[in-house]
Amino acid sequence: MNVPDENIHTLIHALTKSEKRYFKLFVKNIGGKAQTNYIKLFDAIVAQSEYNEAKIKKKFDKEKFVKQLSVTKHYLFKLILKSLLNFHNDHIETEIYDGLKQVRILYDKQLFDIALHQLERLQKLALDNDKIVVLPIIAEWLLSLQNTHFAYQKYDLQQFDNLVRFGEDYIATFRAQYQYLVIWSRLCFYSRKVTYSRKIRTIAAANIENPLLQELPQESFRSQILFHSILAISHQICAQYKESLKHIVALLKLFEDNPNLQMVYNREYTTTLGNGIVLTNRMQEWDLLDKILEQAQQAKTSTRMSYITLQICIYNAALPRLEIYGTVEAIENKVKEVDSFLHEEWEAIPPAAQMTLCFFIARIWFALEKYDRVIIYLEKVLAHNKKLLPTVHSSAKILLLLTHNEQGEHLMLPYAVRSTYRYLKHKEGLFEFEKIMLNFLKKSIDLVNEVKFDKGLKQLQEKIFALMEEGDSAQLEPLLFFDYISWIDSKLTNRSFMEVMRERHQDK
């Protein structure tokens, strides 16, 4: 079966420098002229930002392998995967599954004692690293070897019964773990599909009441990780942030008490650190945030995805805090660092994270009154699908309007206001704050007189305060993305936005 061109190109460009270097050594060790051809084709594809077969054929028109290019690509693809398996052979899963292949070979050679010894080693490895899924397979092999041994040695009924119970126990453990995995996967599926934005709250609320999620499971670490993860995200979706934080703290303690799990479940560990950073930052739990940030900066990441995920969360926490407490120099240095990260990793950064980081940078430039830079980053936010992160998208629309106002672009303002008004009017799931802002924007076109504009701002301020007093945190979500209260106050008192914002937040 031929490998689609985009697959081999994507695979090659996903390799790290170390993996590319190892691949060439791996192929050279195999030897032969055909292997040289694979390296030539590999290098040619590495050099292409987009796969172009016509250029490949032209480059190698005198080479014999180009006449069977599809076959060569197919074997190149397989060689890359084999080299990756060898390169990453220190992974626990790889060691266990390779060990099971060795058991098969030993069994076929009737080396039963050696095979049993190997299985006992794999069983301990799986138990030590919480690899529950493989234990029923090991139990099956142990039973098979016991049955075979019956023809060669005295049958041990007690040992047989113990093996049966061992297999049954871990099949039951895996079944329970699988139930948590299904709940978690369903939560992830609906939370990532914008078309299910209304349904996700129902699912999250149902998870909180689910009998399976009322008591911490003891069967496996994997089940405990899933248990806390489900409830942390479900409570967060339902705007129950304190409850969500309890489960994140419990998860981090689980990883702290069992350091080996930090690499066994590295993605889950780094994701938990990231969620903890985001949530403590949102709740202004600064002491806990500092503790989690310290853990995050010391955490090892096993994949590029884990590194990027964790780095995004660290920046998401650092930028808002610098906005309030940092010097101008510190702010500009951090923005430069984040900008470099965005430039280098843009393709690997999830679109939602691109939007959030760009919005935070735009917000910082707004506070520093560098409005041209604000517009550059807001345009990056608005270039994404408005349904991806609707609250960030609408906040970017409003901030763009405020930026035009600060620049004194009065000719552009009516158009910008109407554009933002139309967007908010047709936005699905409109927040109460956005309705208030919608009415203000509609009226603001005619508020050309400074006295009338100040009066409109005061009315807007009163309505926002009234909304805050109601205490519905779900309806106040847009206020988490920009400090409208400080902006209004800065206009009414004729002071800089940054001065008012810092004064307001440092008094809390």
Image (tube, rainbow, N blue to C red):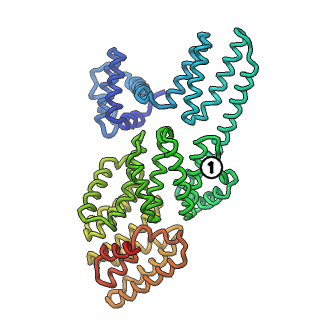
Closer to us: 120 or 399: 120
- Report which quarter residue 361 is drawn in: bottom left
Q: Residue furthest right?
A: 157
Left or right of 439: which side holds 199? right
At label 1, which amino acid type do we have?
Answer: Ile
Quarter of the image where the C terminus is located? bottom left
Q: Residue at x 67, y 25 (%)?
A: 140
Examine the rendering and report whether any part of residue 133 can be seen: yes
Closer to us: 477 or 146: 146
Examine the rendering and report whether any part of residue 66 can be seen: no
Left or right of 330: which side holds 461? right
Q: Which residue is drawn at 48% across and 73% down?
A: 425
- Report which quarter residue 100 is drawn in: top right
Residue 235: x, y in percent? 57, 60
Residue 117: x, y in percent? 58, 18
Q: In this picture, is 49 found above or below 467?
A: above
Total tally of numbered discs in the picture? 1
Left or right of 178: which side holds 405? left
- In the picture of the structure, the residue carrying the numbered disc 1 is 183
Left or right of 476: which side holds 216? right
- Report which quarter residue 176 is drawn in: top right
Residue 459: x, y in percent? 43, 86
Q: In this picture, is 269 found above or below 117?
A: below
Residue 489: x, y in percent? 36, 81
Element type at mark 1: helix
